[in-house]
Amino acid sequence: MKMNSLFFITSSLMTLVLSISVANAFQPSPAQEKIIKQVQVDQVAEASDRLYKLDSVMQANYAKTQHAVGQMQSPVILAMFNGNGGKYILRRDGKQVAVEPVPAIYEQIKSVSHTLVGIFEIVSPYFEYSESGNWRSALSDYNQAMKEALATLGNAGMPEEFEGYCRTILKGGIVFMDNALETGHFTAEDYSKYAKALLPTVMKTVALAGKLQVDHFEAVVKKWRAEMGEEEWSRLYAVVNSAWAMRRQNVHFQIMAQMMGRDAINDRLIMAEALNDVTEDDLLMLLGRVVNDRVLSILVFDKTYRMDVELMGESARAATQDAACPHYPAMSSDWMPYEEHKMPNEQ
């Protein structure tokens, strides 16, 4: 009995030693462990890539279908924003007609009115330390350009009223810059005082520019509608592109809404607010514009968010209402406040 017990114990010990020896013989080295882990990682990555591929293929086919469907639509008006007042493109029956720009005087008075912004962009980085003088060269160049524009303003062929407004704006800017260059000093308060003194005149030019823009493109759209006839017009799609800062009170959206009627809004009349192929630089540039415009808005309008919406929006509304007739009835609309923190789909 004792011999059997001893044999059992001895066998168990031998089995344990053998098991430990076998385990030690197959224990992977650090290098082997690294390979095993890499294989596991690769397997996860492969599985993930195969899942991601499903959406990539879907997106590619989705884009192809979107392109094909978009190309086959007719009639379509594309109301495109640009620095010259806009460009309207009519796509109809496989043909394309483009109309631009608004009359030259629109660009002239806009250029003069923008001098308030032109001066702001030069001096605003130095509001707290104008004594550095690093702004002097740029401001001197802009001052000279404004003096040259003032000297030949009478040759531009503007109506007397328009010319008078432009002369006032140019002279006011030159006085501000002359003083800054002579004294070597300015503050945010100095700029604000200059800008607010000219603001009533600038808003008159804004109203004139808004009317020019509306009159020009409404005439174009009316002509296209007459060519189409009412049945084809009822099938019209229109797309208006807009940067973030100009999506509210957008001039071109107002024009097309006036022409197409309220029922078309967000149905056949679409606002395209996104940037295509956006990059980090695009986003940073947009952020810089928003922040910069809000500083300018405080100094000029005493409203932080006034520049968040299109400056000519109210003028365009007045112009569309003035041009209303039974065939194109005026649309009543209550603007939301400049500062709006609701989500896009909130009431």
Image (cartoon, rainbow, N blue to C red):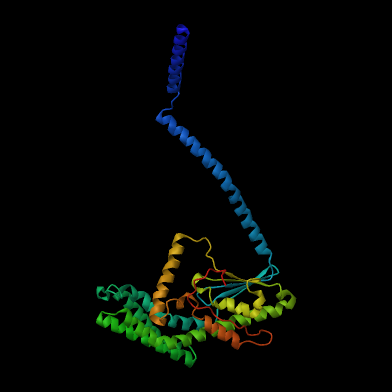
Check the image and report above or below for 252 versus 279.
Answer: below
Check the image and report above or below for 38 versus 74.
Answer: above
Check the image and report above or below for 309 versus 162.
Answer: above
Q: Residue at x 32, y 82 (%)?
A: 190
Expressed as whole percent of the image width and height from the top left, the position of residue 210 reads 53, 83
Q: Residue furthest bottom?
A: 160
Q: Residue furthest right?
A: 231
Tally of numbered tags: 0
Rendering quarter of residue 48: top right
| Residue 147 appears anywhere in the view | no
| Residue 242 appears anywhere in the view | yes
Front residue of this view, candidates 50 and 198: 50
Q: Residue at x 71, y 78 (%)?
A: 227
Residue 21 appears left or right of 317:
left
Front residue of this view, candidates 271 and 201: 271
Expressed as whole percent of the image width and height from the top left, the position of residue 186 reads 29, 80
Check the image and report above or below for 46 versus 331.
Answer: above
Q: Residue furthest front?
A: 1
Expressed as whole percent of the image width and height from the top left, the position of residue 3 reads 45, 6
Q: Quadrant of the C terminus?
A: bottom right
Rendering quarter of residue 136: bottom left
Q: Residue at x 49, y 76 (%)?
A: 309
Rendering quarter of residue 33: top left
Expressed as whole percent of the image width and height from the top left, the position of residue 286 reads 45, 67
